[in-house]
Image (cartoon, helix red, strand yellow):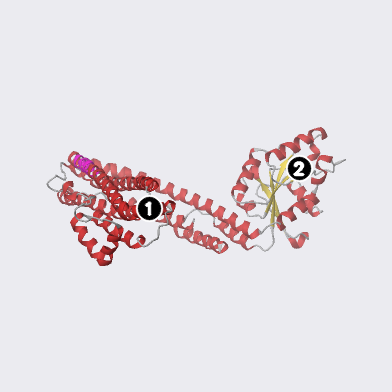
Amino acid sequence: MRYQQVKDKIHSLRILSEQHCLKTDLVMLDDLDLFLEHKSPIVSVIGAKASGKCSLVNSMLDSDVLPTSIFKPGSLYEVKPESSGLAYEIRTGFDIDQKCPEMGYMMSDVVVLCLKATALWSLDDVRVLGELMERGHKYIVLCVTHLNNVKPKELPEVVRYVTAKQPNLPVVYYSDEELMEVPDDISDKYGALVLKAVIEKSLSSGNTLDQRVQIAERIIEKTTDNLISEVNDKKLKLVAERDLKYADHCAKISKKQLIRLGWSEIRVAYEKLESECVETILLQLNKSKAKIVDKLNASIISTPNPKEWWEKMLPIMLKNEIEALSNALDANVQSRVMRDLNWLNREMQNRFRQSVTMEDKSPVNYHLDFKLDSESHTFKNLRTARYITMAGSATLATMIWYAIGPVGAMVSAACGIIGDRYVNKVIDGQRETLKGLVANVVDETIGKMADMIPSRIQGLYEELSNAVGEKEKIWAETYGQDEFECAEDKEIEKINDIINQIEGIR
């Protein structure tokens, strides 16, 4: 499944790049496709210039196939299995200090990183090793070369320094000139034959296709990041050009026409206040739920008769708690709506000499009615609630909706549901079981309130926002003849669409 998804992403990236002339490395995409389909394992031998890569490969092949002199940067040598007798393909020529095409050695099943014994852990060595691990390479072998240039007494320090940096990676030691005697410290880790054995062990230890897919995913992720950065740069240039034109436009139009551009700002800011109000009330509701449960559970602990408490006390206590919570929520909403209306009026007055007056839209007309009329509906116990539910709780809830408001109706309907669901349960005097039932009751009741609150609050703010829209329409008809139009806006819109497509591929 992942394999096919990666193939599809490569295909989509190629099409998108061709359609919009993006600076995607299409050759890299082709190479990535070939890498996924390559039949034999690929072993890349990489390292700094003159780190002994070709000498090492020649030793592995027991033949002077590759030139050992310093060659031009960018030269790539491939040794196919059919010519080497090995079960894998060897690629080398990647000089990491020459900024060679990194994607070349990234597309490998095993990477052998040559470290010069006389210059261990250069900045390039550390950088490349980090990139390999970041891209998902699991099979990396460190090969310390030019061992003949190290004095015997310095060898323990070399071994310690190499393994201290990367204790979890296999290390092989190699000398392009035959050593008089292989030190005991590295006798079991020395030579091309040992390196071949380590490579074969790495290839046989896991599924190379899984690693290839993971590497391809990381490369595609980086490619899409680069593309997004590229198109964002283009977008920023367009935005800068548009802003210059806009500044010129603003200099030419009248003050009132310029002020008119702030209408949308006010409405966007007002919508944000609406969202903040909803979040605040829902947060308050959620915090109150735990407090109500704790208060009811405290009452359970002291009751001598859990069944009687369930049938007689719970409806009364729950009703009182919900009424108190409703009053608190209602007061909070009312204060926030009034505060936000005052803000809206100040902004409109400062910018447009307009306002949503109290006569137009008064918050008093939009009381959320988070109250429960104790005289309209009293539950003496949950058995009564069950009978009411059986008699037609849906009709009753609809009537109460208009009589006592949405929240009151919700509480009534919720209690009906609670009665029908739990009244026949046998309570064995197990208070812990009763606590669980109480938590369910409160959760169901609070959940219904939470479902209702967003639409109710949205209704309050939408009425006021629509009033702003009506005034904006009148203003636009009077002062809106000189609209700002810019060709860059369309280009920016296209770029946003491209970014969305790239994000979709990623």
Where residue 425 appears, as percent x and y from the top left, is 39, 61
Residue 190 visible here? no
Where residue 505 appears, as percent x and y from the top left, is 48, 58
Q: Which is nearer the N-term, disc 2 or disc 1?
A: 2
Q: Is residue 345 magenta?
A: yes
Q: Is residue 185 above or below residue 59?
A: above
Of residue 336 and residue 325, the one placed in the foreground of this image is 325
Q: Are marks 2 and 1 in contact (CB under 8 Å)?
A: no
Q: Which residue is mark 2?
A: 145
Left of 272 or right of it: where is 34? Answer: right
Q: Which residue is mark 1?
A: 306
Quarter of the image for residue 441 reads bottom left
Q: Mark 2 falls on what kind of element? A: strand
Residue neighbourhood size for the residue with mark 2, other residues' Cα within 10 Å, grouped as few (<14), some (14–19), many (≥20):
many
Residue neighbourhood size for the residue with mark 1, other residues' Cα within 10 Å, grouped as few (<14), some (14–19), many (≥20):
many
Q: Residue at x 23, y 55 (%)?
A: 378
Q: Which residues are magenta?
A: 336-347
Q: Amino acid at mark 1?
A: Pro
Task: Choose mark 2 or mark 1, whichever is in front.
Answer: 1
Where residue 354 appears, as percent x and y from the top left, is 15, 43
